[in-house]
Image (tube, rainbow, N blue to C red):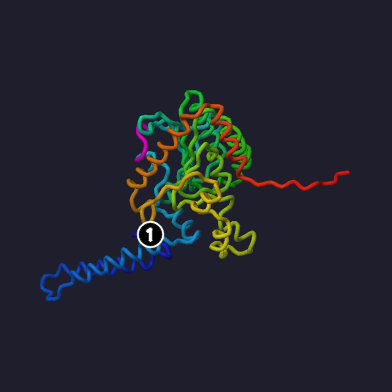
Amino acid sequence: MKHQLEFEKPIMELEHKLEELKKLQLHHDLEMDIDKEIALMEGKLSETRKQIFSNLTPWQKVQLARHPKRPFALDYIQHAFTDFSEIHGDRLFGEDRAVVGGFARLGDERVMVIGTQKGRDTKENIKRNFGSAHPEGYRKALRLMKLADKFGLPIITLIDTAGAYPGIGAEERHIAEAIAVNLREMMLFEVPIIAIVIGEGGSGGALGIGVADRVIMLENAYYSVISPEGCAAILWKDRAAAPKAADALKITARDLLQLKLVDEVIQEPLGGAHNDLKATAASFKQSVCKSLKKISGMSVSDRLAARYQKFRAHGKFTHDPVNVA
């Protein structure tokens, strides 16, 4: 059964009507000619789809970013990369399947690719912990990034997580420390780093693999310090205010591009990346290759300085005189 979001209902209704007309067309004993009606319906369907998906609200984009059919990290690795060889474990505690990564090729370039991975069904979601990594996931990512830095391989990270896992076990194994160390180390790696938000970009869980020379977002992804539901629960004491929170947080790709918090937005097929994975993966590959070529041409010192300044520019600070006497 096709998954249907609330705002997609008008499209689904027109698709159903079009399907019924096509079934009628198969009955050769009908005297009426319905080719014209089918053509009109197809035109109306195309126009409705374009109108809806060209005017999505921030909350509707959040819903699209969470679509169960949306491509995940391993989908992009399969369609945009070649020769992927996965590496497991953090060499400290264990294997976290919410984080995947390993050696791969992007075109002719050898790279290290790392991403957060969700599941398609209940069994896989339990295996992947719904894409929310434990400390060992971030430590595995750091181990892979250190390998990449050692061998001079560019690092490509794919972000798609609602956030790091907030459970007791994660706290006992120091999830905040694991993320903090990644932030520090990613700022210092000498190889080029590119981060792409492909779906959800939730809080420190996303930022734990998100410090990069160039940050790219897919058109219908979002990147936020907190989920709209979490923000609504805090500010409005009601999770039903999530649409209002999504608008206030400025979490869409276009908003973040305008605020200069991301560097580029990759266009998706009409209706979302899940409607045409191959086309989305092709756009993804083209964008990443272009960015990689650009930042690979910089000297190490210039690249590190630019990376530092990029993230320093994300905040605006004012200093008021304070009498501490």
Place residue 206 in its image quadrant.
top right
Task: Say which residue appears at 51% left-offset and 34% top-offset.
Answer: 141
Which residue is painted at 53% across and 50% down in the image? 256
Residue extent of the magenta highlight: 79-83
Rendering coords of residue 137 (x, y %): 52, 38
Q: Does 82 lie within the magenta span?
A: yes
Left/right placement of residue 124 relative to residue 313 reads left
Question: Residue at image x 33%, y 50%?
Answer: 276
Quickly name the residue at label 1: 3
Q: Residue furthest top?
A: 151
Answer with left or right where residue 176 lies relative to residue 147.
Answer: right
Q: Is residue 318 above or below residue 156?
A: below
- Is residue 281 or residue 300 the one in the foreground? 300
Q: Residue at x 62, y 40 (%)?
A: 312
Q: Secondary structure at mark 1?
A: loop
* Residue closer to the observer: 84 or 126: 84
Image quadrant occupied by the C terminus: top right
Callout 1 amino acid: His
